[in-house]
Image (cartoon, grey):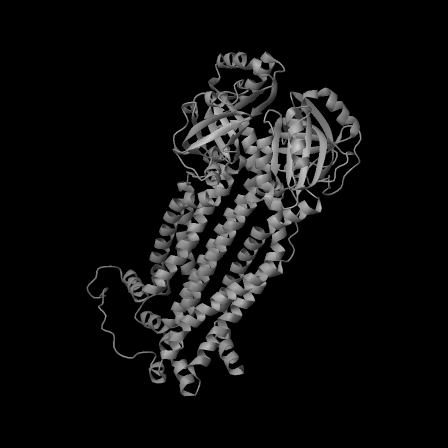
Amino acid sequence: MSKILMLALAPMRKNKGQTVSLFVFALITALLLNIGLVLLFGIGSFFDERAEANNAPHFLSLLYSGTDSETQGRRFIENDPRVAQYEETEAVGGFGEYAINGVNVMNGILFSRVDATQKMDAPSFIGEHLPLTGDRIYIPYHIFTSGGFKIGDGISLFLSGAELNFTIAGATEAIMLGTQMHVAFRFYISAERYGELSEQLPQNGLTLLSARLHNAEDTVFFQTDHDKEVSPDGLLWSMSRDSVKQARTMIPTLIAVIITVFAIILLIVSLIVIRFRIVNGIEESMANIGVLKSAGYRSVQIVASNILQYGLVALAGGLVGVILAAATLPLIVKLFEPMIALVWNPGFDIGAALVCVVLVLLTVTLIALITARKINKLHPLIALRGGIANHSFLKNRFPLDRSRTPLSLLLAFKQINRNMKQTVGVAVIVAAVTMAAVCGIAINYNINDGRDSFARSLFGEISMADVIFDLKDTKDSEALRKSVLESADVRKVLPFEIGTSVLFDEIKVYTYVTEDCSELESLMLVEGVYPVFDNEIAVGPAVLTVSGKGIGDTMTIRNGEHKNDCIITGVIQSAEAEGFTGMLTAGGLKQIIPEFIFSQYNIYLDDTADVEVFIEGVEQTHGDIFSNVLNTQEQMDATLDSMGGMFAALAYGILAVTIFVIILTLYMIIKTSILRRRREFGIQKAVGYTTSQIMNQVALSMTPAILFGVATGTVLGCFGFNPLMTAMTGSMGLAKLDLPVPLEQIIAICAALVILAYAMSLLIAWRIRKISAYALVCE
């Protein structure tokens, strides 16, 4: 064993630079893989831990107090045998807005008494907090971090046309009602302030029915049964813990998937580099292998030394990588805090670390074993001759004496032809990392720069409107519509009702209703056509998956006792309700809700119009008739800004690693090439070639592989970006994405990669200057 270890350590000492390069490859791979796995499997587990620690309900129903729906919901939960624990609390709330960073963001808002008896999801604090007196309020941690608030800051909330001002006294976890990507936020106020709100907003009284089940896996069926039994007239929201978990974790999980896939790409790249290094190492040490075999070493010992050499490097790199991952994770998790709205310290995950180290070690060992097996076939005599068993009669495709091509370029082409496998390997490596970089750039562009297309896919028709008016009373509907249409700034007024609770084949669906679907301007329709007649509907992908139906099939839509059989005409997408969405005409909704009248209007303004000035003018004209007025662009920007930093860091990180991988690959290959061709370079220097000419010859021999790899990676990234994004966002309810790829940015970055690669090739080949022609020839 000591002899094998000695044989393994000798080339590591001789080629320290290449050993360090392989070590860095293993380190980066283990680092990213560990980060990806911890995020992928840790965030969901952490949410479950916090939910159980806070005794969060598996199901939560919010109903208007004093309605038949409240009675039906209470009776259903009290009598259902699946319920293990039940709790009822009161609140004041509804759809409203909160002011953050100068922007009013629309969401559900609930006010609860801090002194109320609450056993499920009771307020648990993050950081310091003050006792609630006067106008003090506890706000969800998401709002606290996103707004950059501190204790003592003021915050304004808007509910049913009333502006409510408070002083922040602390931040709560709010497991079920604490994230922007879900239906509502829960705020806690003092008993005195709560009493004032109840008197001020009597129509906003709510009852919260919370339930924990014997078996958490029954939650989906429990929610479906609940929504069947409860009249939608008084049902504001119903939600499951699973849907809340998905809302909090879907973006971090998406990023974790991207990091993990990129780490796997780097692992494959590392294996290609290691294979190249072993093959070249065998060729370089052919005579030494012959000497070892002649001296009595068996082939298995020499192969084992190769495996041990690369195994030790992989093990060291993997161990350092997972240690660095543990140190880096808290910084990455900090970026996720506004989204998951929880304080998570992942610590050192031993399981993920073991998986990473073992995976890197096993794959490297396996590729080393497979590649080094050719040593078994080497006869000592052939090895002593340098591996030459017979003469080569391959055709000379680049004759130096008959070509007008510059000699340095011709020699570079001969080198490429002689090492075609190496050229292909470099091209594959560059293509793989370039593709990842292109996808990272495209994701960052669509979320932080040209976000219109992504916003349309994520938010649907809301993203196209400039203003949304939500009326308190539908009797003001026609008057508002006529008045707004008279404004010179208005391009179009579209009645567009969202969120009406309807059952499609007994599946609760988040609906979109309009008079004429041909007026829609968004990218919601991904297949088929929009509904035109009263018996037609379009549905989200999740509805089709659960129901097992497709376009052309019939579904029964129901609201209470009213039913209507409808034909599925198309598939729509948006991030609302994780794909459990549906669209129908106003006439179709009136078949099951005869008294339906629009209360929500999308307003589309001219490009030159000032949105805030327009809103102020309408509010002054019509007075206090609105329950909510939404500046949609500000709303979308606030939502996308909360995740923009995460994707920017991801894109720049992938690009930095891509550059580093290309440089490391070039370093290993060019250094090996210089060692193998030292006699050839000595002859060239002896006949008059300058160091600069030889350096350019070496750099030119790498350029075609770099160019082809960058071009291939760019094409694959551009054409594969949307299919990859569609696959990763399918759980959000997005069935087909058609996001733009920023060609100018990508072309500029890829051109910079090629130039950088050529410059680095020259820099790495600069070591030739230190070696004299005499020394190279005599070695």
| Quadrant assignment for the C terminus | bottom left
Left-right relation of 156 to 450: right
* 533 vs 435: above or below: above
Instruction: Name the image quarter holding residue 141.
Output: top right
> Looking at the image, can residue 481 be seen?
yes
Instruction: Name the image quarter holding residue 393.
Output: bottom left
Left-right relation of 518 to 115: left
* 16 vs 486: above or below: below
> Looking at the image, can residue 335 be seen?
no
In the image shown, does 749 or 567 lie closer to the viewer? 567
* 163 vs 57: above or below: above
In the image shown, does 105 or 94 lie closer to the viewer? 94
Point 48% across, 17% down: residue: 490
Instruction: Name the image quarter holding residue 278.
Output: bottom left
Left-right relation of 191 to 406: right
Point 36% across, 84% down: residue: 380
In the image shown, does 732 or 706 lie closer to the viewer? 732
Q: Residue furthest toward the left?
A: 402
* 566 vs 434: above or below: above
- Where does the image place residue 416, in percent across and percent down from the top left? 31, 63
- Where does the image place residue 536, in percent across and percent down from the top left? 42, 27
Q: Number of numbered discs present?
A: 0
- Where does the image place residue 27, in percent across and percent down from the top left? 54, 61
- Where does the image place residue 723, in percent across and percent down from the top left? 41, 44
In the image shown, does 127 or 411 lie closer to the viewer? 127
Q: Residue furthest toward the bottom?
A: 295
